Image (tube, helix red, strand yellow):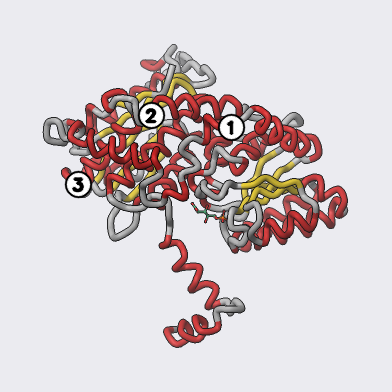
Amino acid sequence: KSITLDITKAEQFLAKGAVEAYESKVKAAQEALENGTCAGNDFLGWLHLPSSITDDFLNEIQAVADTLRKKCEVVVVAGIGGSYLGARAVIEALGNSFAWLIDDRTNPTILFAGNNIGEDYLYELTTYLKDKKFGVINISKSGTTTETALTFRLLKKQCEAQRGKEEARDVIVAVTDAKKGAARTCADKEGYKSFVIPDNVGGRFSVLTPVGLLPIACAGFDMKALVKGAADMEKACGKDVPFAENMAARYAATRQALYTQAGKKIEIVANFQPKLHFMAEWWKQLYGESEGKELKGIFPAACDFTTDLHSMGQWIQEGERSIFETVISVETPRYELDFPHDDENLDGLNFLEGKRVDEVNKMAELGTRMAHVDGGVPNILINMPELTEYYLGQLIYFFERACGVSGLLQGVNPFNQPGVEAYKKNMFALLDKPGYEAESKAIRERL
Ligand code: PA5
């Protein structure tokens, strides 16, 4: 079994053969990725990453995860953007929706920080951790990202104060560059266990490195199955797989055709499983940072259905017709819950008696897709047999591969993110960071 792609409800909004017309361009993009001749070719380490991960390496990650699992009630994963979203996406997709409320002695509670500078968030987090045996995974490729570094300083001090410097050393792990950055300097000086983020893997493509794998293993999930799913999808989306059978190629071509030929400037990834909320957040970063540049790019948005049908549903059904929708559907839920009979039937819901809750959800999904297509919203469907590590691995690689191809079809470098520096420059100038004296003076004159 595999995840599948259905573009028929998108093709009907395009001229006949519009998707197939991309075949030669997609082939050229795939060749450029494989041959390393595309823009951003120093960041292609993700392309064959799944098939190159060895069992020995996964065992090494597992051993560190096992130490954290043994010694910590709570593991705080500090990271932002590509150093955060992939791990959270997989952990939330696989975990119990109420994980942090469950007294589960077999798995540590995984919390995320370093992805904002909210004082209240950090105050509440550090207060919660006061009587906890906690550990930290400090994830930052550059090793200097403000949000993560600020959070890590707070957590490191607290961990050392609560557990002592020696014990803290066993429960603080760094995932960072091999040589550069403050996170590397700190890890080496303190003697923390550390993992390297390869130079040629950009943040948003790094979930299958220790950036994602270590937190996922800490949470108790099977990273080997995740990597296997990704490796199988790597084969299924390779450059020699014919266009008609290549999911990544067809998804990339369809979205570019909708963007350039049908005026669809916004893609909404929608799920009908709240567990997939962060998978869509990960997808938003992957596509937003890869394609939104040079004054172009499809705007990536996300909705959780049916929740957001009661908020964004109106806009999607009848607002400006500049959107298309990509639904991630999960065929079989993990659990079964049947809807009960009620003699009084005060809520009038006896017509649902005996049905699984998922059957109601599936009819909502089908009804929504039909309504949105009728309302002029092209629909792409991605079907996942189940929410498991294996299929999530497939989904991750599928989206990564399609993203590389799609960005190249759009004519941009999909692997850089020059635009994210602008806010940092202003923030450092406003905070009088040493080295920013001229910028500080200039920005103050504008206030
Ligand atoms: O995709 C990217 O490169 C970014 O989103 C980074 O992952 C993010 O800015 C965090 O950077 P770092 O890992 O250097 O702390």
Image quadrant in which the C terminus is located = bottom left
Q: Nearer the viewer, mark 1 or mark 3?
A: 1
CB atoms at circles 2 and 1 under 8 Å apart? no
Which comes sooner in the sequence, label 2 or label 3? Answer: 2
- Estimate how packed mark 1 is, as few (under 14), some (14 to 19) or many (20 or more) residues with alpha carbons within 10 Å: some
Residue that badge 1 annotates: 53
Q: Which mark is residue 429?
A: none
Cβ atoms under marks 1 and 3 closer than 8 Å: no
- Give residue 342's position: percent from left, percent from top: 46, 16
Q: Residue at x 66, y 33 (%)?
A: 57
Position of the N terminus, as image quadrant, is top left
Residue type at mark 2 is Cys
Q: Can residue 292 be spotted in the picture?
A: yes
Which residue sits at x=44%, y=29%?
A: 234
- Which one is earlier in the sequence, the residue at label 2 or at label 1? 1
Query: Label 3: which residue?
Result: 260
Mark 3: amino acid: Thr
Q: Earlier in the sequence, mark 1 or mark 3?
A: 1
Q: Identify the residue shown where x is 71% and y is 59%.
A: 185
Mark 2, residue position: 237
